[in-house]
């Protein structure tokens, strides 16, 4: 946490009693997922050997940085806007033009598309649009790890798009069509991984983030509506990812905005909790006509009286 902008992540970790060792340097990126480490004070040990050291954050130190970020946010915002506008001027012809769309097996023209990115509260938002998926049956597009998000929620992605750096082997092999995000110069680091798995894939060369590329791909393929879940669309989102601007996202959303529905945060609008009072009202409303039929029907009324009489006799009343 730098104090340059409000970063809520460290607070979430510390409030859940997860130790946070900050400023440990780039060497920790060489550690493997699941590798056992030990934190002692400000030091990180592996197999009882000192690996690196940093600063042990606490709730007090994080709150102090958060207060500092309020003062620094204006400066960070100005730099972010300047950088965004500078690169937007350079990239506008690349994004606002007509990119070369690869041949697709998935039918996109005239359909709706749901693009899933593994951003903040993506899981809650994906659950919130479950009825939309069931009723409309849009083309399901997972952007890198977003494909895993779909799979984990019981959906098989129709198309996987991105750098292929955070999608699992299992989901990559699920049978979805694969489109690898390539740089503007045609280089595509993710293509090698796909080929090593003996999977077929096409390339789509476009500047910007993979989620921008997914939107442009669907837009130029003729979809009638794009629904996005978990996307990154504001200053904090990009600063948390270490990006100093959002030129491609700005240009992309200007281009596709007329058919884009950003469902980010839709789960916050309605919690979806069922309250008992409306349920009781519905049940009573359903029972009332039935009771009225019993009351006005002579045959049913007599039958009810006979059953009641038999019940009383059996009890000796």
Image: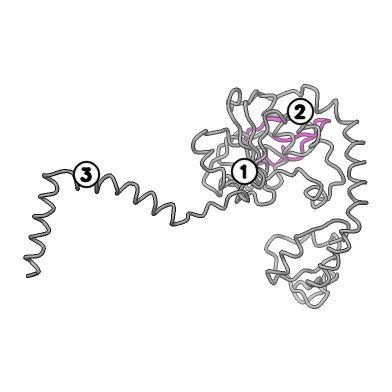
| Residue plotted at (59% across, 30% down) | 112
Check disc 1 and report the residue beneath it: 147
Residue 111 image offset from top left, x and y in percent = 58, 27
Question: Is 46 rendered above or below residue 186?
Answer: below
First-in-chain label (1 vs 3): 1
Left or right of 182? Residue 196 is left
Quadrant location of the C terminus in the rendered image:
bottom left
- Residue 173 sits in quarter: top right
Task: Estimate how packed mark 2 is, as few (under 14), some (14 to 19) or many (20 or more) residues with alpha carbons within 10 Å.
Answer: some
| Residue plotted at (58% across, 50% down) | 270
Magenta residues span 180-205
| Residue plotted at (81% across, 70% down) | 57
Check disc 3 and report the residue beneath it: 293
**Residue positioned most to the front:** 296
- Label annotation for residue 255: 2
First-in-chain label (1 vs 2): 1
In the image, is residue 193 part of the stretch drawn in magenta? yes
């Amino acid at each position: 946490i730098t104090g340059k902008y409000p970063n809520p992540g460290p607070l979430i970790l510390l409030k859940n009693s997860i130790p946070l060792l900050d400023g440990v340097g780039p060497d920790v990126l060489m550690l493997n997922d699941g590798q056992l480490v030990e934190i002692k004070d400000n030091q990180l040990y592996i197999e009882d050997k000192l690996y690196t050291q940093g600063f042990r954050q606490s709730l007090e130190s994080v709150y102090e940085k958060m207060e500092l970020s309020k003062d620094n946010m204006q400066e960070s915002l100005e730099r972010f806007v300047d950088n965004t506008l500078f690169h937007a001027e350079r990239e506008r012809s690349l994004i606002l033009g007509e990119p070369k769309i690869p041949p697709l097996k998935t039918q996109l023209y005239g359909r709706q598309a749901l693009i899933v990115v593994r951003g903040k509260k993506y899981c809650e938002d994906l659950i919130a649009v479950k009825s939309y998926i069931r009723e409309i049956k849009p083309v399901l597009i997972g952007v890198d790890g977003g494909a895993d998000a779909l799979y984990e929620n019981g959906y098989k992605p129709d198309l996987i798009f991105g750098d292929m750096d955070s999608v699992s082997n299992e989901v990559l092999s699920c049978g979805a069509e694969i489109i690898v995000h390539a740089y503007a110069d045609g280089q595509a680091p993710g293509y090698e991984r796909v080929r090593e798995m003996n999977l077929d894939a096409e390339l789509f060369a476009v500047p910007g983030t993979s989620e921008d590329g997914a939107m442009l791909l669907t837009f130029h393929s003729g979809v009638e509506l794009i629904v996005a879940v978990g996307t990154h669309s504001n200053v904090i989102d990009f600063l948390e990812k270490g990006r100093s601007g959002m030129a491609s996202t700005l240009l992309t959303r200007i281009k596709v905005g007329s058919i884009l529905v950003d469902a980010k945060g839709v789960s916050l609008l309605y919690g979806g909790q069922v309250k008992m009072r409306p349920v009781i009202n519905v049940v009573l409303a359903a029972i009332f006509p039935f009771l009225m039929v019993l009351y006005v029907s002579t045959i049913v009324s007599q039958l009810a009286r006979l059953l009641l009489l038999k019940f009383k006799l059996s009890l000796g009343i």
